[in-house]
Amino acid sequence: MTSAPPIILTKLDLQRLERLLDSLDDYGPAAEALEQELSRAQVVERSEMPAGVVTMNSRVHCRDEGSGKDYHLTLVYPHDAGKEGTVSVLAPVGTALLGMSVGQHIDWPAPGGKMIKLTLLAIEYQPEAAGDPF
């Protein structure tokens, strides 16, 4: 990762993600990347989470600046990944999105060594802003 914008997490997301990491049988590079992101996050109460920040179960609109391709993705826990339009928080792009604010971008290594510059254009749905429990 060459660029790491500041990120914000809710206390609840942090606790759930730490439990996820503790439960993994295979603690590989994906888990290490997520752990690094968690360690640098600003942690806030759910009620203090700004609406324009990616939380778990947020649906986002982002763009790969290199290709110009737009994506509409929902950031999910690994057991919910695999459905169209979902991305696991353990996937490199999922880890990159977690805690980002609208307008931020991140450079992230893709398979094959290519770097992707991903810009967060909008939060289409955020559980905290909607008052949802997840």
Image (cartoon, rainbow, N blue to C red):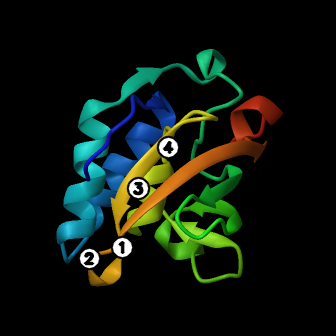
Q: Secondary structure at mark 4?
A: strand
Q: Relative to 32, does residue 9 appear above or below in the rendering?
A: above
Q: Is residue 56 left or right of residue 83?
A: left
Residue type, numbered disc 4 = His
Residue type, numbered disc 1 = Ala
Which of the labelled discs sits on residue 105, or is there none? 4
Tag 4 and tag 1, C-beta contact below 8 Å: no
Q: Relative to 3, does residue 88 appear above or below in the rendering?
A: below
Residue type, numbered disc 2 = Gly
Q: Nearer the viewer, mark 4 or mark 3?
A: 4
Q: Residues within 10 Å of mark 2 (few under 14, many from 20)?
A: few
**If you read the primary sequence from the N terminus, does the residue marked by circle 3 or circle 2 appear first?**
3
Q: Which residue is at 31% across, 40% downward?
A: 38
Q: Is residue 50 visible?
A: yes
Tag 2 and tag 1, C-beta contact below 8 Å: yes
Report how far apart the C-alphas of labels 4 and 2 lie in the structure: 18 Å
* Residue on which disc 1 sits: 110
Tag 3 and tag 1, C-beta contact below 8 Å: no
Tag 3 and tag 2, C-beta contact below 8 Å: no
* Residue on which disc 3 sits: 95
Report how far apart the C-alphas of labels 2 and 1 lie in the structure: 6 Å
Q: Position of residue 112 (x, y in %)?
A: 29, 84
Which of the labelled discs sits on residue 31, or is there none? none
